[in-house]
Amino acid sequence: MGTEIEADGRALRLSRRARAIAQMEAHDLDILVLGRQANVRYISGAPQLWVVGTRPFGPICSYVRATGEIHLNSTWDEGIPEEIPHENLYGFAWNPMTLVGIMAKMKGADTARRVGTDALTPMFAKLLPMVFPQAELVDAEPAMRAARRVKTSEEIAALRRALTVAEEALAKGAAELTPGTTEQHLAGVILEAEAAGGVSTPATQDAAWVTSKDHPWRRERGDGTVRAGDLVALSAGVLADGYVAEVARTFYIGEPTDAVRSLYRRRDHLWDRLIDACRPGNPASALLDAYAQAGEPLPAMPVAHGLGLGFDPPVVSPALRATAERDVLADGNVLAVTGYVWEPGVGAVFTRDAVVIGADGPTVLTQTSKGAW
Amino acid sequence: MTAATVSGVTQIARTGYSRLDIPDEPDLDRMRREVSARLQAAMADHGVDVLVLLGNSNVIYATGISWPLADAGLSHIERPVAVVVAGDEHPHLFLPFREGSASESGLPADHLNGPVYLEFEEGVGDFARILGRLLPAGATIAVDELTGAMRRAGSALFPTEPVDAAPVIGAAKLVKTIDQISCIRRACQITEQAVAEIQKSLVPGVRQIDLSAEFVRRTFELGATTNMFDSIWQVMPTSKAAGTWTTTGDLALPLLTTEREVAEGDVLWTDVSIAYRGYCSDHGRTWIVGQDPTPAQQAQFDKWRTIVDAVLSVTKAGASCGDLGRAATAAAGGQKPWLPHFYLGHGIGTSAAEMPMIGTDLGQEWDDNFVFPAGMLLVFEPVVWEDGTGGYRGEEIVVVTDDGWMPLTAYPYDPYEVSNGN
C-alpha cells in the first residue's frame, strides 16, 4: 500500500483498456458509461473511496472509444492517472441535471450511436438520452465481463498479493480459536489483521461462524459463542489494489471424533474432483458435476466464481445450471472454488481457494494448509 | 446528569434540546411492522402497486434483515432481493446463502425464497416466473435498479414499463421509527466507544492504517455488523494552496488512508461509519497528534461550535434545509461553512448518507421547499478553515423533534476545550 495514493501501474492500466477497447469494438459500443466500482477501477486505474455494498447506478466513469478519453467523477486528482486531465474530472452531484450538463460536454456525446451502461435506473434511462441524443442505450456488462474474464500476468500478480494478506488474516483468526471465544471476536481479529496487513478494504466481512449441526447451511442461532465440538468456518476476503482475494477454512474445536474425520475425508474426496474440473475447455458446470461425482449434495451458494475486481464470470451456481453449461473455462480464468460438505449432528466443512486455470492444468494459489483440526 | 459529566453536543448547544423515549435496544418485530406501514403508505401516495428492490440498503430497510455487507464488486451478484406488494404487510425476500439469516426476518415461510441471480438471463427468467404470480394485472411497478439482463428481458419481466423506486422508498425512509433510531444510537455508541480507545493510542509514529485496524477490531467485538466505508484519518494541509488539487479550488475530503505515519502536530480529520442491525453511524472529529491546540486552532473550534449552536437553535419540525443553511452561513460571518463538493448536513439510516442534503447543487429553492417532519434524522458536518490551523470539522447526529432536536451522539471534543459551555 505504501504512504502515497497512487494510480494502478501504467502497464496494467493500458492492458486493461486495450481489452476493453477490443470488446467495445466487438460489441459495437461507442461510449461506456460505468457506475460499478470494479468497472470504474478497471477503466480508470484510479483508487477511490471504498464504500461497502451495492450502490445505485450513476455515471461515475465514461470511456470514449474514438478518442480514448476518460471522464471520471472525482473532486481531486490524488491517485488519478496522468492520462486523465483535470478538465475531465467532475465532483459529486446531487442534482442529476448537473451530471447531464457535465456529460453532454464530452467530445463524442452528441454523435455516439451506441452507449453501453453497466446498470441503469428508470431515472437515468430517461436522462441519458439527453446526454446522448443520437444513441441507443444498451447493456455494457457483456463487454466488460468479456474484457475482465481472462487475467494478464500483472493481474494474477495483484491477486497473489491480495491473497497473501487474506491468508495471513485467516491464520490470525485461526490462532484465536478456543472454546469460549465468540464469532464477533474472531471477525474482529480477522478484519484487524487484514487492515494491519495493509488492506483496510475488506471484500467480505462475514468472517467467522459456527456451522449448524441441524441444518445444511443455516447459521446456528446461538449467542455466537464457540464451544468444544463445533466446526467453525473462518473466511477472509480482501480488496487489495482493486483485486479480490478470498480464502476460507473450517476448524474443529477439540479432539476430532470419527464422524468429524469422516466429514473431512468427504471434503478431500470432493476437493480432488473440484480441482480436477478446473481445466480449459471444460464447461463451468463441470464444477457442479464434481459434487455429483463425489456423492455430495450441491450447496446453497455458488460452488465457484471468477476472481478479479469483484465477481468475474463465470458464476457457477446450482441456480444457474444452464448458464454454467454454456460457459466454457479458459486459460487465464481465476476461480474462487468452494467445497461444502455437511453432516447432521456434526456441522459443515467449508473450504474456499483461489485456482488459476492454465493450459497445463489448475494451479492452486492459496498456500494455507487444508488442515483438518 | 450534571454539566460536568455530559460530553458532546449538549456542551455547546442547548436551544431546542429535547428528549424522546428511545428504547436501549430495538424491538425488531415492531420495527418491521412500522416500517412496513410507512412503505405501504408511500406506495399508495405514489400510486405504486409493487416495489422490486435490489439495492442492499433498500432491502435492509424494507425487510429488516441485516448481514455483514460485501464489497461492491461482489455484492451486485449475490444479493438479497425484496418484492413489496401493496396490501401485503410482509415483503417477499430472495436470500442468498451468505447474506443474512432467514430465521431473523420474521417473515412467513411462503414469503421466503432462495437466491435469484439478476445479472444473468437464466436468473431473471426464474425471477420473472415467481414475480408473475405476485403481480396483480396492470400493476404499476417501481424498481431501484435494472441490470442488463433485466433490461433485455423487457416485458417478460415487467409487463408495464417500471417507474423509479427512489422517490417511493425515499419518502418512506425520511421519518424513522423509535426502533430505527435505537439501532442508529446503538451504532453511534459502538463507534464512539471504539473511537475513544483509538484516540488514546494516537501518538506520533502510528500509521493511519493501524487506526483503521483497531477501529474495525473493536467495533466488531462491540457488536457492529458491517464497516460501511474505508475509515478516514486525513492529515490536513498547512494551507489550501498546499493541499491536493480539487475541481472546486477548496479542500479535498475524504482522502484515502495509507500506511503514512502521523507526526506530532498533525491535524487529522476523522470520518468513520459502522452498521448495527443494518443501521449506520457516522462519526467525525478533528484531532491534533501529540499536542494541545494553539490559540488559533482553539479559535477554529470555537467558531465551529458557534455554527453548530446556531444551526441547532433553528432545527425543529417545520424548519427547512434553507433555514439551517442560512443560520450556518450567518454564524460563520457570511461564508458557507461547508465544503462546496459536500453539504452542511445529510440524513442517515440504512446508508451513512441519505436525503435530505443541505446546501448542495439541488439549489436554494429545493432547500427552502424541503420542510422537516418530526422523527427525521440529520447529521451536521460544518467545516471551518483558516490556513495554518488545520481547520475544524466534526459531525453531530440529531433527531428532529416537534420542539427542537435530540442528540444521538455524545463524543467529546478533546483536545479542544469547550470554554464557557452552556
Image (spheres, coloured by chain):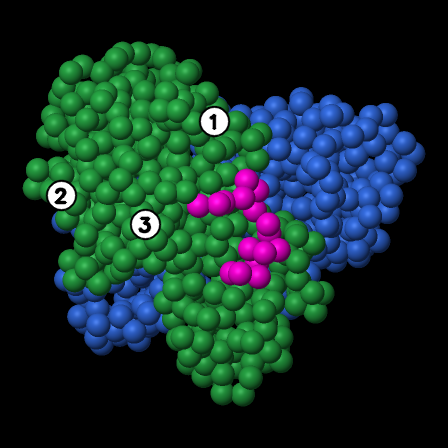
What amino acid is at disc 3?
Asp
Q: Please give the label number shown on residue A271.
A: none
Q: Mark 2 lies on which chain?
A: B
Point out the image quarter for the C terminus of chain A: top right
**Could you confirm whether marks 3 and 2 are on the same chain?**
yes
Which span is picked out in magenta? Answer: B20-35
Q: Chain B: give its colour.
A: green
> Dot 1 corresponds to which residue?
B194
Q: Nearer the viewer, mark 1 or mark 2?
A: 2
Q: How far from the left and from the top, in percent, is residue A86?
A: 15, 45
Q: How far from the left and from the top, in percent, is residue B169?
A: 42, 64
Pointers 1 and 3 in contact (CB under 8 A)? no
What amino acid is at disc 1?
Ala
Residue A99 appears in the rendering: no
Q: Residue at x 37, y 20 (%)?
A: B4
Point out the image quarter for the N terminus of chain A: top left
Q: Which chain carries label 3?
A: B
